Image (spheres, rainbow, N blue to C red):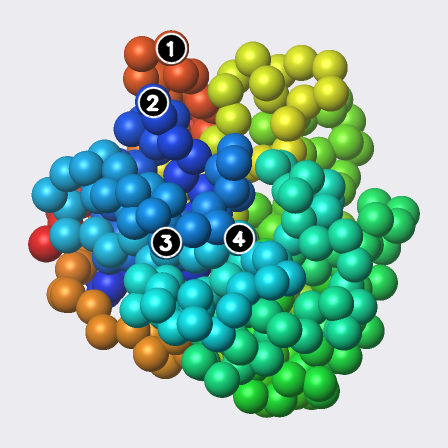
Amino acid sequence: MVNTFIINQALDMHLHLRDGDMLKLVAPLTSNSFSGALVMPNLVPPITTKEDLLAYKQRIIQASKDDNFIPFMTLFFQNNYTFEFLQSIKDEIIGIKLYPAGITTNSQTGVSSMDIEVLRTTLENMSKLNIPLCIHGETNGFVMDREKEFMPIYESLAINFPNLKIIMEHITTKDAINLLDKYPNLYATVTLHHLLITLDDVAGGMLDPHLFCKPIAKRPEDREALLNAALKAHPKLMFGSDSAPHPKHKKECCGCAAGVFTSPIALQVLVELFEKHNALENLNDFISNNAQKIYGLNLNKKSIKLIKKDFIVPNIYEYKEEKVIPMYAGKTLLWSIDSIEK
């Protein structure tokens, strides 16, 4: 029986930190134990300039205090980024995030067309400068089919821009898993909650707003495909929590916001999940090594010792007026964080 486990240089390659008091609340819940995280740019207004990006990065660093944590920054995709602009900001970003307009939280100013010719200027400049493209891959079709319908767009992008590293963000379907091995320039992230839940957990009984997210959780066969790939630490798959905090009053209401807040429990639950499936030897690849290879990262050493000891998930996290409910609030997990070597 395993009673302790060490995670080295944990990385969250898809994270929402928000801003203001919410940033001050949630940033330490990641920075305390993770070595770094890829930060989403969909603020209001979105991060589209070097000035805004550097200012946001500084706010994240201040909120993270002395946690030896690296915020990997991203720009919000626009069709008209010039080569000169991207060259000037290349060393400050890890990628550019593309949102189809209106498809998820704060994406109203995303791209209105996925036509290759409309996107070509920015994508060619990104290819020349070796800047990865991160995509929220959903159409505006029937909600259960949106990711599947986006697969031909991923294929078109992979074919038309073979030198562009493309990351399919927070994948939720077996179709996306199958696409990983088809094109050398396609990669993906997967969340904790999509490894655990299906749509039935969200809406099969009483509606659970704290499990409602976009992309929406799918079918059991999709979850199994995702889990199988993660447990084997598929070399083109990375952990990206898509932890998305929303105020309690915006989750527990009619027309609730989409997003699952998992940052405080991600490491504990991943160890429990991988141990359950006898795959602990692959966890460090899934949560760190794969991302380091894909993005070419060089991190300071930081290790987290977890022990088999009950951890009761807090019912709520609060800072001033901000109140956020985590996934599994009030439930008991089998693993706890024992110590962190920074």
- Name the residue rendered at 77%, 27% in the picture: 205
**Structural distance between the alpha carbons of marks 3 and 2:** 23 Å
**Structural distance between the alpha carbons of marks 2 and 1:** 8 Å
Residue 294 appears in which quarter of the rendering?
A: bottom left
Q: Position of residue 213 (x, y in %)?
A: 65, 39
Cβ–Cβ under 8 Å for marks 1 and 4: no
Q: Quadrant of the C terminus?
A: bottom left
Cβ–Cβ under 8 Å for marks 4 and 2: no
Circle 3 or circle 4, nearest the eye: 3
| Nearer to the camera, 5 or 179 | 179
Mark 2 — residue?
Answer: 21
Circle 4 or circle 2, nearest the eye: 4
Circle 1 or circle 3, nearest the eye: 3
Q: Which mark is residue 183?
A: none
Judged left or right of residue 301, residue 328 is right
Mark 1 — residue?
Answer: 321
Tell me if residue 327 comes above or below residue 286 in the rendering. Answer: above
Q: What's the residue type where badge 1 is placed?
A: Glu
Q: Earlier in the sequence, mark 2 or mark 1?
A: 2
- Outermost residue, right side: 142
**Structural distance between the alpha carbons of marks 3 and 4:** 11 Å
The answer to whether residue 312 is seen in the rendering is: no
Tell me if residue 120 comes above or below residue 98 in the rendering. Answer: below
Cβ–Cβ under 8 Å for marks 2 and 1: yes
Residue 156 appears in which quarter of the rendering?
A: bottom right
Instruction: Say few, some or many: other residues with alpha carbon within 10 Å of mark 2 (under 14 / 14 to 19 / 20 or more).
Output: some
Q: Which mark is residue 50?
A: 3
Q: What's the residue type where badge 4 is placed?
A: Phe
Q: What's the residue type where badge 3 is placed?
A: Lys
Q: Which mark is residue 76?
A: 4
| Nearer to the camera, 80 or 67 | 80
Q: What's the residue type where badge 2 is placed?
A: Asp
